[in-house]
Structure formats: structure tokens, C-alpha cells
Image (tube, grey):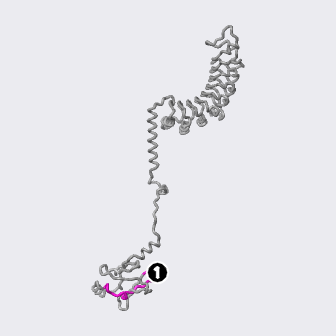
Amino acid sequence: MVKLTSDLIAKQTPGHNKRRADESVEHYLARLTHLPFQDRNIDSIDSIPPCRLLTVIYLYDNTLTKIENLNFGENITHLYLQNNRIQKLENLDCCPKLQKLYLGGNQIQVLEGLDKNTQLKEIYIENQHLPEGEKLVFEPRTLHCLSQGLEILNVSGNNLDSLAELSCLERLQELSASNNRLENLRELVQLLSIWSRLKRLDTNRNPLCSKGRYRERLIVASTSLEMLDGKQITDNSRQFLTSWKASREAIQTRERSRPDFNDPPAAYSSHRVSVTLPSIGSTVTRAQSMTIHQMPVFPRQTSSRIEPRRQGFKPEISSAKKSQFQMTLGENGHRKLTAGSNRTPSFHSSQNSHHPELTISNHSRMLSAHGLPVQTNFK
């Protein structure tokens, strides 16, 4: 196992940053800008004198289990720690100017401990070696502190089933979330409306990629997207898909506004037509004022006696006196005809002063009575 110390840095720093023979260790560390110690089997970091010009540290492909003693590089902007054995994000508040953080291929379960690193622009925390069934978790406080500056985020291969927690990252320009368990396409479409600056999106190798019109829906949902799953989005394809979406929405709007006559009547409550019916009193009044024709009923007689009477029924019958006919109105409202002593039909009313007027028409052979809604045929 190897520990990173100031002596190791002074002896084995490769390239043009090699220490001169007459140069002290402190002076040498003070002028360092890059520290390339990747793939050196380093498992820990010792306390190192300040390196005020140091901006980039390469410590990837080692065996580090903990982030510690980085206060020697207070001006660090790029920190490469991928492919180590780091289990927790900590001790990075001593690097307030950190802009790019590479953490892929470690054992980190929670994205946390970055409250003081408000200048971070890029975080790469893909493919963490998580316990079976676990997924990467985002601390809300850390996300809130990163929301005003973070532009690039890589969370691929971390068993994520949702990206809703990342909705606060409104300045995001690139997001890599491939090889996860994302299934909710509608959620992703809504997030694209929030990430108005997003230019590159990679959600390849997720279950939602198999859904119908997956690519088309994402392109239409975001006007800023330039690259999707490694494929460029041309202006012509975006214009075509935008026009297609507009025409489809217009058709759906017309279909929704068109009534369906197969639906039950309750579905058309908005299409009711109000009809005002006349009152019962007005109907009765009009019925009483109507002229009703009534056929007289003669007593049933034998055929020998009816025939002369039929022959003797002349147009002059209209001159018959009203007293020759008798009509009585019973309690049940029906009119009754009775024959006189001379067997000539006569009409009388039980109330002589109020009985209706009856006349006989010689053309229609009908009796007309004003106010009597009764009609009968000759027998």
C-alpha cells in the first residue's frame, strides 16, 4: 500500500513539473499546478504542505477508501477520484473552488457533503458499486446548494427508477442517466419542461426507451435539446415533429368537442332544449269555446218503421223546434238522449236556463252544440 506524501510528490512527479536538483520541497510544491498520481496503488493521503497554485489532482485508478487531507489544495478546480474504493463523500469543504468532481466507479451510496462547493459545474458519479437492490440517493440539501451552478451530471448505472429529485437543477445542460431503471416517460417529459437549458440527454438502456414514440415525445417536449442518446437532433426533424404534434392536438380537440350520440342522455345535459307547455286551465278554456258536432241517436226500431223515417228525413229538418229534442246532463258528465211521448227524439237540459244550443245541419247531417265536447254517429 502506498500513501501520498510530500516526499513522494517531490521524487516521482513526472513530466515538465519535475523538481530541480537545487530546489527545496516547499518551493517545488508551491509552484505545482497539476498533480498526476493516477494508478499508483495509493490507498491514503498524508498531510501535505500548501500547494497554492495546484488546480488539478489526478488520483483515479487507485485504492483510496476515504477522502481526506485535501486542504493542501484550496484552489483545486478539478478532482479526479474515479475507480477507487471511496464509500462516502466527505472532507470536500476545504475545496471551495472545486468545479469538476469525478467519482465514478466507487462505492458511494449517497450524494452528499457538497454544501460548501457551490461553484461545482460538473459531477460524475456514475456506476457506483452498490449493494444488491440499493440505488443512489440524493441529499436534498446538497441538491439545493448545487442547483444554482451545476450544469453537467452523470448518474448512469446507479439503479435509479426516478429523476424527480433532480428537478431543482434548473441550470442543467447535460444529463447522463443511462443503464438505470427509468420507466416513467411522462415524468421525464415533465422534467424536460423544467430543464429549459438542457442540451444533451442520455437515457439509453432504460425500460422507457421501449415505449412508443419515445424519442419523438422527448424531442417535442424540449426546444433546447440538441443531442439525445448520442444522436444529434436536426432542426428539420424538430420542425416536423412540432407540426405533427400541433395537428394531432387539433384533431383531439375537435374529437373532444364533438358529441357522441352513443352516450346516455345524461351526457347531453348541456344540450337541453327548454319547451314551455300551455297551462291546463288555458287548454280547458279553449276546449269549451270550440264548436263540437254531435250526431243524434234515434231509438232502435224495426226495419219497417225506420225506412219511412229515413225517406222522410229532408233538409227541412233544420226547421224543427228545439223543444222537440230533450237532452239531460247526468252527474257523470255524459249527455243522455230521451224520446218524447210521440216517439220523436227531443233534447232537454236539467237546467233550462243554461242548456247549450243545438242545431241540425242538413248538409253534414250533424247536430252542433256550443260547449259540448261530445260527438256520436247515427244508429
Q: Residue furthest bottom?
A: 341
- Can residue 141 be spotted in the picture? yes
* Residue situated in front as seen by the camera: 256 or 144: 144
Q: Position of residue 368 (x, y in %)?
A: 36, 80
Q: Is residue 332 magenta?
A: yes
- Report the magenta residues as a range: 317-334
Q: On screen, 36 above or below 236?
A: above
- Can residue 1 be spotted in the picture? no
- Residue type at the position of mark 1: Asn
* Residue situated in front as seen by the camera: 376 or 258: 258
Q: Residue furthest top?
A: 22
Q: Position of residue 330 (x, y in %)?
A: 45, 83
Residue 330 as seen in the image, left or right of residue 160 = left
Q: Is residue 240 magenta?
A: no
Q: Residue at x 46, y 65 (%)?
A: 276
Q: Quadrant of the C terminus?
A: bottom left
Q: Within the image, what quadrant is residue 120 found in? A: top right
* Residue situated in front as seen by the camera: 195 or 203: 195
Q: Regarding mark 1 in the picture, which secondary structure is present there?
A: loop
